[in-house]
Image: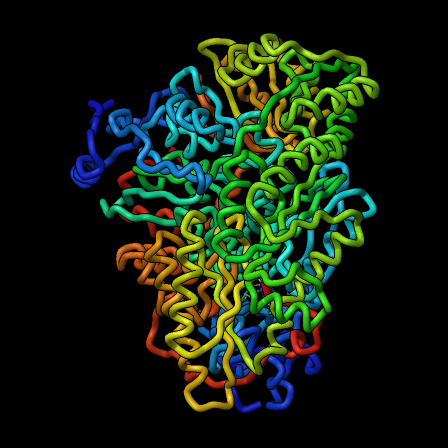
Amino acid sequence: MSAALTPASIAELVEAVRSTPQLIAVGAGTKPRLSAVNVTKLSTTALRGLVEYEPSEFTFTALTGTPLREIIAALAERGQYLPFDPMLVDAGATLGGTVVAGLSGPGRFRFGGVRDFILAVQFVDGAGRLLRMGGKVVKNAAGFDLPKFFVGSLGRFGVLTEITFKVFPRPASRLTLKVEANTIEATARILTEAANSRWELDALDLLPDGSSICLRLAGPSAALESLADEILARWPGRKLTEAEADVLWAELREFQWAHTGLPLLKVALAPGDVVAFHQTIAALDGARAHISAGGNVAFVSLAAADQFAALDEKLRALQLSGVTLRGDAPLWSGTRTASKISHAVKAALDSENRFPSLDD
Amino acid sequence: MAHPALQRLAELLPPERLLVQPQQLAAYESDGLTAFRQRPLAVAIPETSDEVIALVRLCHELELPFVARGSGTSLSGGSLPVAGGVVITLNRLNHILKLDPAQRIAVVEPGVINTQVTLSAAPHGLHYAPDPSSQSICTIGGNVAFNSGGAHCLKYGMTSNHVLGLKAVLATGEVVDWGGASRENVGPDWCGLFTGNEGLFGIALEITLQLLPRAECFHTVLAGYRTLEQAGDAVAAVIASGLLPGAMEIMDALALEAAVAAVHAEYPPDCEAVLIVELEGPREVVSADRVRLDEIIAASSPVEARPARDAEERLAIWKGRRSAFSAVGRLSPDFIVQDGVVPRRRLGEALRRIGEMSRESGLRCANVFHAGDGNLHPLILFDGRQPGALERAEALAGKILKMCVAMGGSLTGEHGIGMEKRDYLPDMFSAEEIDCMKRLRAAFDPLGIANPGKMFPGPEAPALTHHGLHPLEKAGVIFRE
Ligand SMILES: Cc1cc2nc3c(=O)[nH]c(=O)nc-3n(C[C@H](O)[C@H](O)[C@H](O)COP(=O)(O)OP(=O)(O)OC[C@H]3O[C@@H](n4cnc5c(N)ncnc54)[C@H](O)[C@@H]3O)c2cc1C
């Protein structure tokens, strides 16, 4: 593996891209499998800081290497937050890494994921051109929506330099409830009913223990208590204290429940897949899964690297797909469709293959 | 059938679904932007995805330009035909293929009308959030192509925030199938890239939409202000308070006058502006939030604030708002509408300058807009029978667009670039950025046969002619916002 470049300005980054035949950008390295390719690493960590923040506009622009932690703190000072609920914040994850990984947290249940809050990007394409796409206002329909395309793109189409996001006012308070179900079928039913309810939950997750469901309410505190009572009258469970809730959500956010040093994957699910998916994980000895966003995404921690093949096969049978965030396992799992358009778009943005392809 | 392409097309469709006679083609000559007109070579009326795929593959083989068309309500000339090309209308692909309340999704064909989705989801307590005011007539395919919006974008986003999956035939003939029932995605977000392509990438065949539970409860307030500026300040105060309303709309004096004339809406007297704010959510949340909203509005020195006391009063408020644009038609024989976006904090300044520019050009301009997200909708009134009036109106529209971009906003919040605003694209994007978009377009459509002449500045601009309101607007079926 070649030595890392660490540009300290956008101009230096552009220059670094132009003068390096093959490279990939890396943020804080919290999802190392995504950039485990044998090319020059370009670290974005020196490109950090908020460039613009207009609380009255519900928008900010930050340099790609800015740690999420800094952004969250700056927004909190003005009573705002990132509704897609970023992951790996304490671990030091950067804004750019979060975008290209396409990683959203449990709070994405309410208003949507990274893709729903990204408004604009500035990036360097494979020819070393510095380009801006999207618009810096909360509503824009001009030009193709490349900012969304970069979400989940693993940095294979360009290096992000600046990103503009939409933000929301932070709800006045939160309340987390934990309810238990005996069977996975019962769990799936609770997820569906809760998701379709009048409560407008902020998060709806099945914990890695496989049987506890956490429901998070967010809004004016006066309202939350009575909503919580109604939920607990429906299913047995309890309200968590603020401290308990903080620990719980931090554990999920930072993947503290996952096996260390072993493969960790993100799998896109539909709520209807929850039962079959849960059974798949249960059949892999010691493997765990956190099923998040009402059954729309799962994070899977394998108990041994050699479980990957079995998981891969199962995902294919279920027509699901996954991407490995860390650990020693292939990047993609489950179904993958090869399309001509994928290569054509790659050629449009990176004709010289300066960045690795999605297949690497 | 002299034209060789017509012969080949006739092999794909029965004669009653391949229109070639001038009188048949006339109905397709323009869209919601009636200033442009173009007669196509033919109009193809497929009934199945397979027929659409076969048509696109034939167009690719013959290098024949094609324009996908939903209901033709585009306000930017997006579905304007191309001379010598085929219009592929998708209205007959109008089936809701799947409605899955447990997973809160609908899978629809592109010709399904926007409101049909919500109507079929309603019995399950669900709805489809994007609500362009043309929703009773525009198609999901058109919404996807233009990433259409509506009054609820600040909180719920635009069409693209609700598209989970797409099956499409690209202009190369390749059929792709992206995403699906999951709200998450693995790999690059192809649905995100496709949505808003303005018909330049290919034709959407099946769209998976996310549905949301319908809000249990609403609190809607209408407040009148002496000045537009005060109404703008009230919006700023609501935003600063940390509330997240479902909608925030402003109407100015001229728009109010029109709504009064059209639907006998009643507004507080002597107001230069009316603000509508709506909260929505579980009843406990709304009753806590409404106390704060009512305080904020009371403190914003309105002439009068009227909270809707029941569902009927709420509907009346929205009826006035929704009617405003077509109502403006009663004040003036013709109008054009723009939909530039400005940063919210500059709304007051933008409106002042629009007022000045409108006085300078001698044309009246009404404003009805999505104040919550800074999305203006200046309606420029003119009389197309007067020589040069349309050109003056277009010139004023252009000045307004340039102002929006100069203020750090956008050329369009929801109507798209289309034919109308393509010459302004370089005001918002550099030459290199436009080249990048052209390369992307070429990746999807190397021959340049899908809706050519739109979005990018080009030489072959058809002459502007004057043709009046969209026929359905004249009939009061659809409204402009
Ligand atoms: C009175 C009035 C009010 C309006 N209000 C709003 C509003 O509030 N918000 C808003 O956003 N817009 C609004 N519009 C604009 C317009 O209704 C939207 O742009 C709408 O999405 C167009 O839908 P359509 O079915 O009429 O599409 P068309 O006008 O037929 O087509 C629009 C574009 O989509 C392409 N297209 C159509 N179908 C497909 C397909 N299946 N695959 C690929 N491309 C396709 C066409 O080529 C064209 O470029 C309004 C229009 C009118 C006339």
Q: Depth check: B449 or B112 in front?
A: B112
Judge whether B109 appears above or below B125 on screen: below
Q: Is residue B274 left or right of residue A138?
A: right
Q: Is residue A306 left or right of residue A125?
A: right
For the point 49% across and 44% down, which residue is it?
B236
Picture quarter with ligand 1:
bottom right
Give residue A141's position: percent from left, percent from top.
47, 55
Quarter of the rendering occupied by the C terminus of chain B: bottom right
Q: Is residue B333 left or right of residue B263?
A: left
Quarter of the rendering occupied by the N terminus of chain B: bottom right
Give residue B57's position: percent from left, percent from top.
53, 66
Residue B453 visible from this viewpoint: no
Judge whether A278 appears above or below B120 on screen: above
Q: Depth check: A2 or B429 in front?
A: B429
Judge whether A19 appears above or below A30 on screen: below
Give residue B62's position: percent from left, percent from top.
47, 74
Give residue B38's position: percent from left, percent from top.
50, 83
Q: Depth check: B226 or B129 in front?
A: B226
For the point 37% across and 79% down, which residue is it?
B460
